[in-house]
């Protein structure tokens, strides 16, 4: 066991973040996936947000449409020369006519997660405001206070297209009462310059997570190798409340049957005053050589002492944490 007891005192009980909703069971970011995660008792529902051509913030993970919608059949001629259909090239009313379904590998057309929901139904893309209305309505009807955990996607890409995503996200959250650090909301972004801008220039007091990738993913201009150092984490702590690293940046299983090997990232982040919410637990795609779902949760929560987890299977994570169903007779 490591630094978890002090972390628990500093950051409270660990939180469960339903990554793109109950995406292990229903197509990511659809309202049904969000409603199901709410019913399963998650603490937070995640939104990825991108802007449409007519500047509507919509809940969608990719910058391009073809992996989770029928855009190729519906708008064949709207493909860019690079072979992709971009969200930002469509008006919201057009996007709302697309059918959303489980993710496919474009090259092969095969399901990205073959064990997941494979039915075709009239599921669609919703705006951030529509999703926040769903959360408000479900919280009111159930008496819960399920929060939102909202990602500003690729701000530099939006800026290059003449659009400013962060103020649109912050304004929409504010319309639904998410204005400051005591509200049940977190903001997240991979771009360190944008995270700092959200706090300083835009003056948001929402809880803020600096997402941490690998430099070769080219998610942002941010140098994540530097950001993960003790000095880098101290700089992050000047504007953010936590970090969201990739699970292998915390723990890896070097080979089948071998015990897990831990980095010092969680302890270093805690020492800087930062909460740690890694991504992403997938019961159907465990970290390489990990022996099972329970072992992954044990390594993250009990040994490394993380403060939350992005999970495609929020019920599995809630069960590990011993969380009871929220409504008892
Ligand atoms: Ca995300």
Image (cartoon, grey):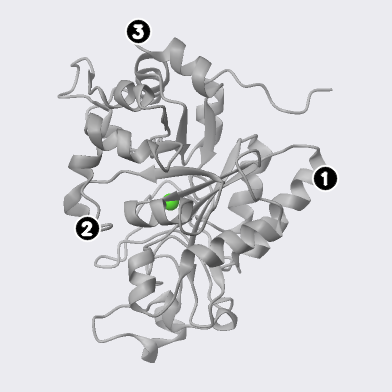
Marking on residue 141: 1
Q: Tell me if residue 287 can be seen.
A: no
Q: Secondary structure at mark 1?
A: helix
Q: CA distance from mark 1 to mark 3?
A: 41 Å
Task: Pinpoint residue 49: horizontal percent, then vertical percent.
Answer: 49, 62
Q: CA distance from mark 2 to mark 3?
A: 34 Å
Nearest to viewer (mark 2 / mark 1): 2
Marking on residue 286: none
Q: CA distance from mark 2 to mark 1?
A: 42 Å
Location of residue 247 with respect to 34 vertically, above or below: above
The residue that disc 3 covers is: 1
Residue drawn at x 16%, y 52% is 216
Residue drawn at x 37%, y 73% is 159
Task: Pinpoint residue 212: horizontal percent, then vertical percent.
Answer: 31, 43
Mark earlier in primary sequence (2, 1): 1
Q: Secondary structure at mark 3?
A: loop
Location of residue 149 with respect to 233 vertically, above or below: below
Q: Is residue 101 left or right of residue 174?
A: left
Quarter holding residue 256: top left
Residue drawn at x 66%, y 21% is 324
Quarter occupied by the C terminus: top right
Quarter occupied by the N terminus: top left
Q: Tell me if residue 124 can be seen.
A: yes
**Badge 2: few (under 14), some or many (20 or more) residues near its Cα, within 10 Å?**
few
Q: Are marks 2 and 3 in contact (CB under 8 Å)?
A: no
Mark earlier in primary sequence (2, 3): 3
Residue furthest to the top in view is 1
Mark earlier in primary sequence (1, 3): 3
The residue that disc 2 covers is: 218
């Amino acid at each position: 066991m490591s630094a978890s007891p002090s972390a628990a005192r500093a950051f409270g009980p660990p939180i469960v973040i339903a990554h793109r909703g109950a995406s292990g069971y229903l197509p990511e970011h659809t309202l049904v996936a969000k409603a199901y995660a709410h019913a399963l008792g998650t603490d937070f529902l995640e939104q990825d947000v991108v802007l449409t051509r007519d500047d509507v913030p919509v809940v969608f993970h990719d910058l391009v449409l073809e992996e989770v919608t029928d855009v190729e059949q519906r708008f064949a001629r709207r493909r860019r020369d690079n072979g992709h259909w971009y969200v930002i090239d469509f008006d919201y009313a057009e996007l709302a006519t697309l059918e959303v379904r489980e993710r496919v590998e474009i090259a092969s057309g095969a399901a990205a997660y073959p064990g997941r929901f494979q039915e075709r139904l009239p599921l669609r893309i919703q705006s951030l405001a529509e999703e926040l209305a769903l959360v408000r309505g479900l919280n009111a009807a159930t008496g819960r206070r399920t929060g939102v955990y909202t990602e500003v996607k690729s701000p530099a890409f939006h800026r290059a297209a003449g659009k400013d995503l962060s103020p649109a996200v912050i304004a929409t959250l504010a319309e639904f009462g998410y204005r400051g650090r005591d509200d049940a909301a977190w903001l997240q972004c991979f771009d360190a310059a944008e995270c700092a801008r959200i706090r300083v220039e835009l003056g948001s007091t929402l809880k803020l997570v600096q997402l941490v990738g690998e430099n070769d993913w080219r998610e942002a201009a941010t140098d994540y190798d530097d950001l993960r150092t003790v000095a880098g984490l101290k700089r992050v702590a000047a504007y953010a409340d936590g970090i969201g690293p990739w699970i292998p940046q915390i723990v890896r299983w070097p080979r089948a049957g071998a015990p897990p090997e831990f980095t010092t990232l969680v302890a270093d982040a805690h020492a800087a005053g930062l909460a740690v919410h890694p991504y992403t637990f997938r019961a159907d795609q465990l970290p390489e050589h990990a022996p099972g779902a329970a072992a992954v949760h044990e390594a993250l929560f009990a040994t490394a002492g993380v403060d939350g987890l992005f999970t495609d299977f929020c019920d599995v994570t809630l069960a590990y944490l011993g969380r009871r169903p929220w409504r008892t007779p």
